[in-house]
Amino acid sequence: MEQPKRQPRKPGWRFALLALVLAVAISAVVRSLWLDIFFIPSASMEPLLHTGDRILVARTGFQAEPLGRGDVVVFDGRGSFAPLNSGNGPVVDGLAEAGRWLGLAGSDTTYVKRVIGLPGDRVVCCDAGGRLTVNGQQVAEPYLYPGDTPSEVKFAVEVPAGRLWLMGDHRSLSADSRSLLGAPGGGMVPLERVIGRPVQILWPLDRFAAVARPQPAATTTTTNGQ
């Protein structure tokens, strides 16, 4: 009697589960060391980044070329923009982190802003011409949201060593270093809190585009001593 042919064993659920675990582990390593995805929750960086954008962030974006004025950075705001002990419990925080990891939601402690002042800089707004100045030089800001002024809030700050002065491009809507002038730290963000720089808008597809690093900001010498 002819023996029935044995059917090859098909990969079972264990193989599928192992493949899923490996994929998640590899993704976690990549996203913790090189590239990550972040959700833009507000209009504070318009017109460059819009509410709902998903951006790819290079964690190594400033290794080959140092961070400079005008660079856009993603950073951990705990201890400067957000309280160090912010949290809503392990379950809520876990769900929020899962949404952030999947690029479906923003983070209460992660922000994206533009570098205006580097360590040692004196940043003033505004001079007699209504312009922002850094170390006594007016700064051209072509990235500003159309119709916005450099700042409705007047300030003159010295950026300490190891810190950054950060502002949004949509100045009239952005809560940034200016909002924390009277708080401990004065709105200055530690350099070590910088996560990386946006390199690509991934979603929505009609906005799929690279995020180029800016050219050095154009400046002109002022004459009012500010």
Image (tube, rainbow, N blue to C red):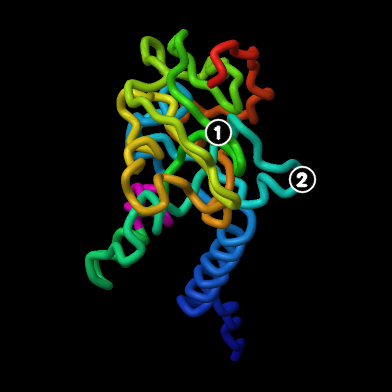
160 or 104: which is nearer to us?
160
Residue range in magenta is 99-108
Place of residue 117 in the rendered image (x, y in percent of width and height, measured from the top left): 55, 35
Does 220 appear above or below 177? above
Front one among 76 and 17: 76
Mark 1 element type: strand
Determine crowd level at label 2: few under 14, some 14-19, many 20+ residues with C-alpha closer than 10 A.
few
> What's the residue type where badge 1 is placed?
Arg
- Res 195 seen here: no
Answer whether residue 103 is magenta in the image. Answer: yes
Seen in the picture, residue 204 relative to 85 is either above or below; the reply is above
Residue pointed to by mark 1: 122
Q: Label 1 neighbourhood size at 10 Å, few (<14), some (14-19), many (20+)?
A: some
On the image, the x and y values in percent for residue 159 come to 53, 42
Quarter occupied by the N terminus: bottom right
Residue type (three-letter) at the residue carrying disc 2: Ala
Q: Main secondary structure of the magenta part?
A: loop
**What residue did someone put label 2 on?**
64
**Percent position of residue 43, x then y:** 34, 29
